[in-house]
Image (tube, grey):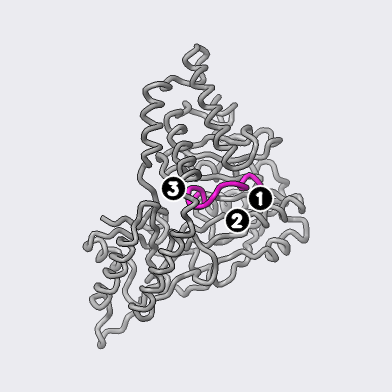
Amino acid sequence: MPYFDYNATTPLSLAARDAWLKAHEEAWQNPSSPHRAGVRVGLRLQAAREKVALALGCAAERIVFTGGGTESANGIINHLARTLSADAKVAVNPTEHPCVLAPLGLHFGGDRVVNLPVDANGVVTVDAVKAALTEGEVKAVLVMAANNETGVLQSWEEIAKICRAAGAACICDASQWLGKLPGAGLGMADWMFCAAHKFGGPKGVGFLLRPTAENGFSVRPGGAQEKGQRAGTVDFPGIAAMVAALLDCEQTKVLHESDRVRTREAFEQEITRRLRGVRVAGAGVERLWNTVTLIMPHGENHRWVARLDKCRIEVSTGSACSSGKDAPSHVLAAMGVPGDQARRVIRISAGWETTREEWQELADALVAIAPDLKPADNVISIG
């Protein structure tokens, strides 16, 4: 089946699978153990840390291996809540992932959270960040690198520079960026995090970057893992698989981005030409090469997904973590998309293995099923 839900999760890459199997055969011991076998695994763990640091352009001591994006985000925000002054504010891009917005609301409720304005494409402008930092009350800025629903790219590099100049922490969710675009330079952010299963690694593994001099930080307190920054037993095979997947993307895949952008643009041009009334969210700005969010001309999004599923094509209604909620996407709401239109949205997210023929099959299927989802002339549609 053509799979167009890579932003939700990806299959395990061959590089990751081989690394995972090799680690389970050769390095299954606990790296925290004092015996020689444990020490050898510990050395491999450090080598994995250094490989990630080299790919991102940062010091290896900044890398903390975690259980994934949600754990990382919660740990970072909890740390900010404990260490920032009681009157300090944080500024956030309102199109962030729920794993950021939920703990922010828990730890920084009320007027301590400043929503950065976004334009109609969902972009946080550099001027908006500068304005938020003008008064000196905002001590941390949270802006993701690439949006999980629309694929819209943010100016994370410029934002990191502005935050550094103002003495504010810059926190960047790079979960959708890594593995699709080069990771070099992401170390500019004070804090950055990701999840392995978004770029061909296993589920339940991720990593974050922290400031080198940040003392007292813990992702999950109460244990000796990662120099006391995380509890539990180190999953070295999972970490080895994640690093292999990341390096495979960095070394063999991200250089093909331009070709994939052309493929995505060809699909958008064709579907907007053949299916009257369809629109592409965030069409006016740079987006991930793999992501297309379509606002369909009619029909509720779950019906489109179900009909495509019968055609053996898999797409999504939006963020997988929000698929069980009835409310329209908070991302589209921040972009000014009315609720009735947001309920007609489908998210298409391809992978490196997705072929031009599969994009064409998707376009043909959308055009073919559209008449069946159009309400009858004597029926008033409310969504």
Point out the tag, 2 or 3, that comes first from the N-terminus: 2
Circle 2 is placed at which residue position? 143
Mark 2 or mark 3, whichever is nearer to me:
3
Q: Tell me where residue 357 appears, x and y as whole percent.
A: 30, 62
Numbered label attached to residue 170 = 1
Going by the numbered disc 2, the residue's amino acid type is Val
Going by the numbered disc 3, the residue's amino acid type is Lys
Image point (62%, 62%), residue name: 115
The residues bearing labels 2 and 1 have C-alpha atoms spaced at a distance of 8 Å
Q: Tell me where residue 240 appears, x and y as whole percent.
A: 45, 32
Going by the numbered disc 1, the residue's amino acid type is Cys
Which region shows up in magenta?
175-188
- Per the image, label 1 sits on a secondary structure element best described as strand
122 left or right of 82 in image:
left
Residue 78 occupies quadrant: top right
Point out the tag, 3 or 1, that comes first from the N-terminus: 1
Numbered label attached to residue 354 = none
Mark 3 or mark 1, whichever is nearer to me:
3
357 left or right of 154 in image:
left
Q: Tell me where residue 183 appears, x and y as whole percent.
A: 56, 47
Residue 316 occupies quadrant: bottom left
The residues bearing labels 3 and 1 have C-alpha atoms spaced at a distance of 22 Å
Image quarter where the C terminus lies is bottom left
Which residue reaches farthest bottom? Answer: 378
Tell me whether the residue at label 3 lies in contact with that at label 1, contact meaning CB atoms closer than 8 angstroms: no
Tell me whether the residue at label 2 lies in contact with that at label 1, contact meaning CB atoms closer than 8 angstroms: yes
Numbered label attached to residue 198 = 3
Label 1 crowd (10 A; few <14 / some 14-19 / many >=20)? many
The residues bearing labels 2 and 3 have C-alpha atoms spaced at a distance of 18 Å
Image point (43%, 38%), residue name: 204
- Residue 257 sits above or below residue 68 on the image: below
Image point (43%, 22%), residue name: 27
